[in-house]
Image: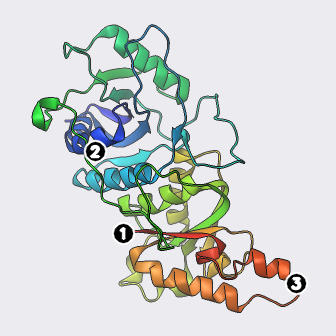
Amino acid sequence: MALFRSGLLVLTTPLASLAPRLAPILTSAARLVHDTLYVHLQPGMSLEGPAQPLSTPVQATFEVLDFISHFYAGANVHPHLDIRILLTNIRTKSAFLPPLASSVQNLAHPPEVVLTDFQTLDGSQYNPVKQQLERYATSCYSCCPQLASVLLYPEYEHGGLPVEVSLPSTIRPSSPVARSPKQPVRGYRRGAVGGTFDRLHNAHKVLLSVACVLAQEQLVVGVADKDLLKSKLLPELLQSYAERVEHLSEFLVDIKPSLAFDIIPLLDPYGPAGSDPSLEFLVVSEETYRGGMAVNRFRLENVTCEGDWQRERMGMGKAIVGRVLLEVP
């Protein structure tokens, strides 16, 4: 039986080696936490040095986006866990990024325990390492006053030796260009994502997380309502619009509080993405890819002839919504 309602999992293993270890790590964490599990990525961090480790920026690459997708997919075997991968320290390649915040980030469910995949050589719950872990966690996030800490020692395959694997490419740009795992992902000021977001689940979280990584100032989130719900199977069983927005808002503010979120009702297939020239990207799922293409065609067809500046900003001849469209299976 799980002991804690909420927890923070600090992952320190490099991502390529971490991917094949995720299943046992998640299983170990699920034995301790029964409700909300926050995840903080800090590859390469050591907890055994004399100095207090600090949160440092993690370059947003396609490998990071693929890892986020892979993590949420693996979490489906633990349906009792509300997984939230925190994105504050994941930074895109962008000239207009604000400096990494040094203040403590508030979380909707302050962790009662901090967990980590960092392991000591003797496989013990070494107190100085746990103390470093607790100090690190409380320097980054609001935690419960009596914070517990646990070093996870799951049973890995291959005797626990680091094995690097390449994650499947689940995040794809709309343009047919080659992408490599280590390729940096660029950031944009404003973008959009839309959906029904009924009973927020891990596939929704992938879509939203990718959008949050790309957006640096504002993310417009369209939530289907009214006429757009009529085509849904058993629409009367859907959560109310207010309830969906409440859960969505809490998740978004938790994972990236530096963003401004504009959550609006989506009343037609195009929404603001079809007309707002300041939106630079749209993130879609595999099943809504055609809808994303239709949004871009709608934008191009409805550009007025009042000035060339508007044609340029509306993305004439460019990819979806002016810049980029990402597909998330």
Q: Secondary structure at mark 3?
A: loop
Q: Nearer the viewer, residue 49 or 207?
A: 49
Horizontal side, residue 168 vs residue 173: left or right: left
- Amino acid type at mark 3: Gly
Horizontal side, residue 57 vs residue 328: left or right: right
- The furthest residue to the right: 306
How many angstroms separate mark 3 from mark 2 (CA)?
50 Å
Q: Residue at x 81, y 79 (%)?
A: 310
The residue that disc 3 covers is 307
Q: Residue at x 54, y 52 (%)?
A: 213
Q: Position of residue 184 (x, y in %)?
A: 52, 50
Q: Position of residue 49 (x, y in %)?
A: 42, 11
**Dot 3 or dot 2, earlier in sequence:** 2
The residue that disc 2 covers is 19
**Dot 3 or dot 1, earlier in sequence:** 3
- Amino acid type at mark 1: Pro
Q: Position of residue 311 (x, y in %)?
A: 78, 82
Q: Residues within 10 Å of mark 3 (few under 14, many from 20)?
A: few
* Residue 268 visible to the viewer: no
* Residue 312 visible to the viewer: yes
How many angstroms separate mark 3 from mark 1 (CA)?
38 Å
Dividing the image into 4 quarters, which one contains the C terminus? bottom left
- Amino acid type at mark 2: Ala
